[in-house]
Image (cartoon, rainbow, N blue to C red):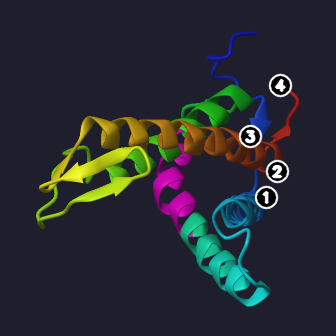
């Protein structure tokens, strides 16, 4: 059977979609909290987790939701489709945020650097800034692949053909 066969092998319900959305937002927020706020005290980590959860929830809902809906309607319901969509959406969104919507240009006079050198110089993203954004985007894409698989596993069940 082909991955692009439009026969409905998997189906879902609104209830399972809602649970999958919440599970993915909770796991995404938990991983982000562990990575970026791992050394904070409990109160700060709880606040960080709460806001990270809200960001993940609404990002999955408003960015991933329309893509998932279209894929579902076109019969693209395999776990490979879910992981690909998760990776592409999170990676693209992250790099768009890091590069000011792919322009590499800031409207304000910005200069910034990290331990390796300047990432922004005179409101322009440097080559190091682009490479940092791409490298970080790949890691975020990996997280998106994992969350896409989790959403698929929670939301979909095999149906008889």
Q: Position of residue 110 (x, y in %)?
A: 18, 63
User: What residue range appears in magenta?
Assistant: 58-71
Q: Is residue 115 above or below residue 92?
A: below
Tell which circle, 4 or 1, labels the residue nearer the N-terminal end: 1
Q: Which mark is in front, 2 or 3?
A: 3
Q: Which residue is mark 3?
A: 149
User: In the visual, does 137 lie left or right of 123?
Assistant: right
Q: How far is the residue under mark 1 from the one under mark 3?
A: 14 Å
| Residue occupying image coordinates x 47% and y 61% | 62
Q: Position of residue 126 (x, y in %)?
A: 23, 41
Q: Position of residue 95 (x, y in %)?
A: 39, 45
User: In the visual, does 55 lie left or right of 106?
Assistant: right
Tell which circle, 4 or 2, labels the residue nearer the N-terminal end: 2
Tell which circle, 2 or 1, labels the residue nearer the N-terminal end: 1
Q: Which mark is in front, 1 or 3?
A: 3
Tell which circle, 1 or 3, labels the residue nearer the N-terminal end: 1
User: In the visual, does 7 lie left or right of 116?
Assistant: right
Q: Which residue is mark 4?
A: 161
Q: Residue furthest bottom?
A: 43
Q: How far is the residue under mark 2 from the one under mark 1?
A: 7 Å
Tell me, for residue 16, which label it has, or none.
1
Q: Position of residue 60 (x, y in %)?
A: 56, 58
Residue 23 visible? The answer is yes
The secondary element bearing badge 4 is classed as: loop
Tell me, for residue 154, which label it has, or none.
2
């Amino acid at each position: 059977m082909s991955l692009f066969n439009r026969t409905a092998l998997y189906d879902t319900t609104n209830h399972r979609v809602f649970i999958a959305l919440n599970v993915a937002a909770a796991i995404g927020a938990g991983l982000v909290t562990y990575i970026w706020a791992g050394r904070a005290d409990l109160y700060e980590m709880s606040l960080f987790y709460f806001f990270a959860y809200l960001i993940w929830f609404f990002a999955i809902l408003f960015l991933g939701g329309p893509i998932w809906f279209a894929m579902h309607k076109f019969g693209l319901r395999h776990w490979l489709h879910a992981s690909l969509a998760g990776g592409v959406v999170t990676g693209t969104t992250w790099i768009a945020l890091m590069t000011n919507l792919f322009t590499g240009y800031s409207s304000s006079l910005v200069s910034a650097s990290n331990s390796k050198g300047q990432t922004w110089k005179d409101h322009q993203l440097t080559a190091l800034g682009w490479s940092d954004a791409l490298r970080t985007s790949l890691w975020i894409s990996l997280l998106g692949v994992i969350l896409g698989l989790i959403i698929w596993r929670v939301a979909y069940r095999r149906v008889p053909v």
